[in-house]
Amino acid sequence: MSDQLRVSCRCNTVKGYVAVGDLSAVPRYVCHCDDCQAFIRYLGRAEDVLDRWGGTEVVHVTPASLHLESGRDHLRCLNLSGGGTLRWFAACCGSPIGSTPKSPGFPFVSLVSTFIRDTPEKMSIGPVRGRLMLKYAYGDVAPLRKDSLSAFRMFLGVARSILIERLFRRHRTTPFFLPGTSSPISPPHALTAQEREQAYGALSAGNGGTA
Ligand SMILES: [Zn+2]
Ligand SMILES: [Zn+2]
């Protein structure tokens, strides 16, 4: 028995659901890192996604639990810094979807919570477990300090989930990679120098999050 979190991009072209066993156990975090901020700025969505401290709220789900019913051909991804993370978005309307490791062998999705529709199920997700990478937050961050969480502690939960998915061989079921391969369904886009300047340039000034 599982609940469903309905998901869709802003224009409703990419849509589907996440099958969740226990909504209250879905891990929820806010990440303030420069890459998360740059991703949202690249898409021009700072105003409606970033919180007043430049944080992006995400929930952690498995790729096998994310079922896209339509619009999969609109998925695109960025590889911001040449690192091991792919940042996925819906090209139809520039809605952020989330990030995954570069390899399907690490079955994990950090889903941007604005991709989840506002339903009673969404309201039943557990509370924010912590705020990551506060050193990149801007504004008065004093009220956030008590919620600061190290990336290592967050990673422990991810690692356990990855091991379970691999144990049950569910890592091959993913909407983000071509079946049976390590190839993303859309070639990762590396930012041009100009895109990089626009996405990261505003970071120190913190002028992207006007909420
Ligand atoms: Zn981040
Ligand atoms: Zn769309």
Image: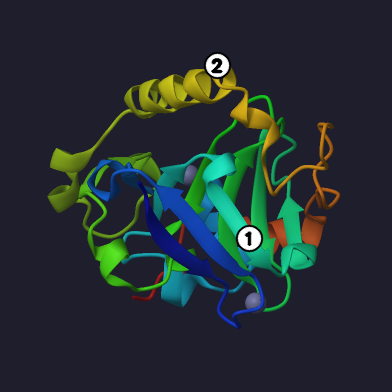
Helix, strand, or loop for circle 1? strand
**Disc number at residue 167?**
2
Q: Nearer the viewer, residue 133 or 70?
A: 70
- Residue furthest toward the front? 1
Q: Would residue 202 be seen by someone viewing this image from the given angle?
A: no
* x 35%, y 51%: residue: 137
Which residue occupies the foreground of this view, 22 or 44? 22
- Taking the spot 48% from the left edge, 54% from the top edge, the residue there is 18
What x and y, as percent, mark residue 185? 82, 49
Please identify the quarter of the rendering in which residue 151 is found.
Answer: top left
In the image, 48 versus 144, the foreground residue is 48
For the residue marked with disc 2, what is the amino acid?
Leu
- Name the residue: 69% across, 59% down: 197
* Residue 197 shows in the view: yes
Counting labels gives 2
In the image, taking residue 1 as reference, residue 162 lies left or right, namely right
Q: Is residue 40 above or below residue 102?
A: below
- Residue 131, relative to residue 210: is it above or below? above
Pointers 2 and 1 in contact (C-beta within 8 Å): no
Callout 1 amino acid:
Leu
Residue 68 tag number: 1
Q: Which percent across, then down, holds residue 43? A: 63, 69
